[in-house]
């Protein structure tokens, strides 16, 4: 009850140590785990990887028990879960209004956004690494159970490219979070982008010649397919760049610009 | 010291804050009083860099809020106690702030003790907190960095009378040590209990400011007599504008003046005193009556 612990002294000043970026990343990481929903969202990534691995061991025919099969089994759930992790780490500040505290403790919103992006990417990379490890264990067990030699048909480079593809998906989710600042809106936008749009654009490409040639340059999903296919060529990297500019860099820049100017209520 | 200079914030044609200037001195608790929607919260959000001002300037000891490195260590802010993630525990919320500011975990326990949240309560999720508990958590959060300036929006909202009394002691002590405190409220009695200096805001404009004593003095006189009707007539004849107030009459001049008028008219007074906080209440309602959502009911038609 006593206020003895507070001894205000001297004046407020604009000199003195600031807040290091690593500390902000640490705080943002902690925020992703310290709510019940956040914790279980993270757990679900691991649980999904384990379930996908078990399903492969139990139901895939012997000839299919290879490391690549395990990798693709948790590919889709990861493509869904990681962007949601990224979206929620952004939108929570607005939907739960925690931004009132976050942005008064750190008035430089750009730093917070960067810290959140770093934390989300970190979580994405670690999740993918864990999933690959779980898949590797599954591959060894699956082979042993079926009396086969384990087949390692994915190189380290292949794995890196798959991680990159998932991180790109995560960043698009992050971008929608920044753009909409609303969990439901951002998640729906991401689902449309990741699961509806490819079909529509594919249809358009099938019907219109001009779009078929244009598609690799403007369709970010399409441009990512080489990442799962042994690696992009020089031209395909360029296509990743142009489509990424359209689907990530430009909307992200617009979203950040708005966040920096918007009122936090 | 907080210096607000010609601060204006417009939303289209609506002027939420309209040319507001005031100063909060160190060593004092400054109360920011006004009805809902008067512009208190907007002003406080501008102070802390959450809302850009349309024009004007706010400085804290000459510094803009966003230029303060690690501001939590210098300025304690509570803008809305309910703005917390419902799924986090109280302790975890303080922990995040401590981490951001670079403070040890032991500081969290000190703060919990300071605001009388028990260890068991601090491990509960905030969705299970009462408003009073959220306010205590918010105050703990604001005080954690041992700041020199406190900016608190409606901190007494939801506190029980004992809680308000506790907060008065806490802020009093803090100001006595040289801290600057600005707190807002839409309730006169809260501000009256806690603040030294009062700023009344209505419709985005400052309508009165001064020490509590100043404002009380200008609140006029309360008088009763054996014949209120005749006294009211006499006051009116003397150029005053008496109004009915309960059993008696309120006038905006000081008691000595009322006494002289009554003596001249030969009316025996039964009670004569400064209107005090009741007068302040009336003044508050009048000053902000344009901005009230409901028109203020006249206290009584003319003299009683």
Image (cartoon, helix red, strand yellow):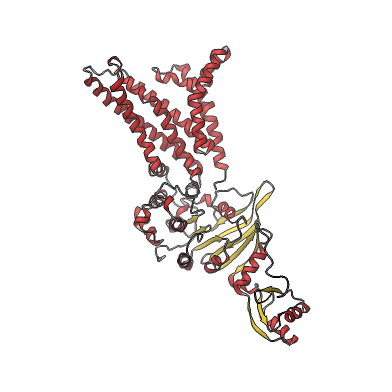
Point 57% across, 48% down: residue: B51
Q: Quadrant of the N terminus of chain B?
A: bottom right
Q: Report whether residue A29 is seen.
A: no
Q: Residue pushed farthest top?
A: A209
In the image shown, does B86 or B174 lie closer to the viewer?
A: B86
Q: Nearer the viewer, residue A60 or B90?
A: A60
- Expressed as whole percent of the image width and height from the top left, the position of residue A179 reads 54, 35
Q: Position of residue B301 (x, y in %)?
A: 72, 70
Residue drawn where x is 50% and y is 36% of the image: A184
Q: Residue furthest right?
A: B237
Residue A151: x and y in percent read: 27, 17
Residue B303 location, x and y as percent? 72, 75
For residue B175, above or below residue A199: below
Would you place residue A148 above or below residue A31 in this image?
above
The front one of B20 and B194 is B194
Image quadrant for the C terminus of chain B? bottom right
Q: Is residue B127 above or below residue B269?
A: above
- Total marks in image: 0
Snapshot quadrant of residue B44: bottom right
Above or below: residue A84 compared with residue B154? above
Question: In this view of the protein, can residue B201 be seen by the observer?
Answer: yes
């Amino acid at each position: 009850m006593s206020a003895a612990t507070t001894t205000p002294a001297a004046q407020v000043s604009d000199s003195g140590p600031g807040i290091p970026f690593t500390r902000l990343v640490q705080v943002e990481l902690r925020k992703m785990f310290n709510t019940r929903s956040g914790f279980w969202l993270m757990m679900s990534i691991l649980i999904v990887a384990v379930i996908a691995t078990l399903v492969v061991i139990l139901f895939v025919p012997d000839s299919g028990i290879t490391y690549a099969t395990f990798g693709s089994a948790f590919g889709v759930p990861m493509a869904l879960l990681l962007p949601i992790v990224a979206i929620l780490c952004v939108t929570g500040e607005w939907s739960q209004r925690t931004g009132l505290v976050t942005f008064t403790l750190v008035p430089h919103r750009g730093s917070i956004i960067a810290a959140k992006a770093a934390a989300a990417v970190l979580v994405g990379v670690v999740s993918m690494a864990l999933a690959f490890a779980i898949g590797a264990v599954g591959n060894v067990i699956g082979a042993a159970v079926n009396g086969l030699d384990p087949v390692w048909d994915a190189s380290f480079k292949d794995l890196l490219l798959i991680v990159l593809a998932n991180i790109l998906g995560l960043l698009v989710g992050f971008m929608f979070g920044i753009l909409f600042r609303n969990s439901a809106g951002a998640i729906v936008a991401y689902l449309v982008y990741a699961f509806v749009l490819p079909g529509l654009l594919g249809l358009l490409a099938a019907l219109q010649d001009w779009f078929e040639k244009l598609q690799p340059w403007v369709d970010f999903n399409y441009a990512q397919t080489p990442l799962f296919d042994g690696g992009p060529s020089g031209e395909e990297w360029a296509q990743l760049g142009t489509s990424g500019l359209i689907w990530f860099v430009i909307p992200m820049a617009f979203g950040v610009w708005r966040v920096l100017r918007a009122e936090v209520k | 010291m907080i210096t607000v200079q010609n601060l204006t914030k417009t939303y289209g044609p609506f002027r939420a804050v309209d040319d507001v200037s005031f100063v909060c001195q160190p060593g004092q608790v400054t109360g920011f009083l006004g009805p809902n929607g008067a512009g208190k919260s907007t002003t406080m959000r501008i102070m802390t860099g959450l809302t850009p001002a349309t024009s004007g300037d706010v400085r804290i000891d000459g510094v803009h809020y966003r230029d303060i490195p690690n501001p939590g260590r210098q300025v304690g802010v509570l803008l809305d106690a309910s703005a917390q993630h419902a799924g986090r525990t109280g302790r975890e919320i303080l922990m995040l702030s401590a981490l951001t500011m670079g403070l040890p975990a032991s500081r969290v326990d000190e703060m919990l003790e300071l605001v009388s949240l028990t260890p068991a309560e601090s491990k509960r999720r905030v969705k299970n907190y009462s408003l009073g508990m959220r306010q205590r958590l918010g105050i703990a959060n604001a005080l954690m960095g041992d700041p020199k300036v406190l900016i608190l929006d409606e901190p007494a909202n939801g506190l029980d009378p004992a809680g308000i009394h506790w907060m008065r002691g806490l802020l009093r002590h803090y100001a006595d040590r040289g801290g600057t405190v600005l707190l807002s409220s839409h309730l006169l009695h809260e501000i009256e209990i806690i603040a030294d200096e009062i700023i009344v805001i209505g419709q985005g404009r400052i309508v009165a400011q001064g020490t509590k004593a100043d404002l009380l003095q200008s609140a006029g006189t309360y008088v009763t007599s054996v014949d209120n009707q005749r006294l009211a007539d006499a006051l009116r004849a003397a150029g005053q504008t008496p109004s009915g107030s309960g059993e008696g009459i309120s006038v905006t001049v000081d008691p000595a003046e009322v006494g002289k008028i009554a003596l001249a008219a030969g009316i025996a007074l039964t009670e004569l005193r400064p209107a005090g906080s009741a007068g302040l209440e009336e003044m508050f309602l009048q000053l902000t009556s344009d901005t009230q959502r409901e028109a203020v009911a006249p206290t009584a038609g003319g003299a009683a």
